[in-house]
Image (cartoon, rainbow, N blue to C red):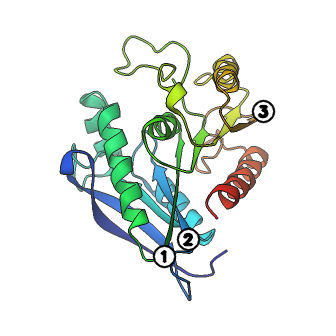
Amino acid sequence: MSDTLSARTITITGAGGDEIEAYLARPEGEQDAASRGGVVVIHHMPGYDRATKEMVRRFAELGYDALCPNLYHREAPGADPDDAAAAARARGGVPDERLVGDVEGAAAYLRALDSANGKVAVIGHCSGGRHAVLAACHLDVQAAVDCYGAFVTGEVPPERPITNLVDQLPNLSAPLLGLFGNDDSYPSPEQVDELEQILNGQGSTYEFHRYDDAGHAFFAVDRPSYRVAAANDGWERIAAFFATHLA
């Protein structure tokens, strides 16, 4: 754990060479070179908001360099998170290919830091959970965390401009931690079962935890969906998972 940290907004190179906004948090104090892992935090559909930035700072407190790219920067640079999210949704959301490129740029930034040990994890909640799995199917990362990501498996409603990731899951090479609520509908317990069956069948390294009396967004402290026991246990699982794979 780090007693002090620094956090600031920076610019990184994302997909297609675009310069995009990102939020960086790092532990402060004496630190040996090449000693820290990095964490790319992928924000949820509500956007690059206060709750997501708090998560970025929490990973810095845990001793990692953490970075969240603003996936909506192109649609609404400098806009309020709600307005930016609305603008992005109006354009059909974040294209999968662009998401992978933005996360790749974030991972490259983290690996270029003097403190970096070369290991990077990705984590996301809600739509960010799906994006974390997507990124881990295409990029060189050492760990991935999916917090109740919808449409990794299962049918996608026709109005959604995305597909599930079933055909891409064979490319998953990083260990995956999944945290899910048993009262959730997206993903439903049946969709989580499907994902676990696929991962088990292809010999992937994974660890799933499911919580009773928890639905979607049980980590969200500012929503009625927040569940203290599930969130606290989930944070402990994340910390242990990263300690194993990013050390």
Name the element at disc 2.
strand
**Badge 3: how crowded within 10 Å, few (<14), some, or many (20+)?**
some
Query: Quick one: label 1 or label 3, which is nearer the N terminus?
Result: 1
- In the displayed structure, would residue 34 be above or below residue 81? below
Q: Nearer the viewer, residue 79 or 245?
A: 245
Circle 3 is placed at which residue position?
Answer: 213
Relative to 195, residue 22 above or below: below
Q: Report crowding for label 1: few under 14, some 14 to 19, many 20 or more residues within 10 A (C-alpha).
A: many
**Of the pair 247 and 155, the residue shown nearer to us:** 247
Going by the numbered disc 1, the residue's amino acid type is: Ser
The kind of residue tagged 2 is Arg
Q: Position of residue 69 (x, y in %)?
A: 36, 54
Q: Amino acid at mark 3?
A: Asp
Find residue 5 and report its horizontal and vertical position in percent: 52, 78
Which of the 4 image quadrants contains residue 239?
bottom right
Tell me the CA gap for discs 2 and 1. 6 Å
* Left or right: 155 as drawn, with respect to 101: right
x then y, percent, for residue 34:
51, 75
Report the residue at 39% width, 45% height from top: 47
For the question of whether residue 154 can be seen, the reply is yes
Residue 89, image quadrant? top left
Q: Is residue 96 above or below residue 4?
A: above
Residue 155 placement, left or right of 210: left
* Residue picked out by circle 1: 115
Tell me the distance, in whole angstroms, between the alpha carbons under discs 2 and 3: 36 Å
Query: Where's the N terminus, which quadrant?
Result: bottom right
The residue beneath circle 2 is: 36
Circles 2, 1 touching at the beta carbon (< 8 Å): yes
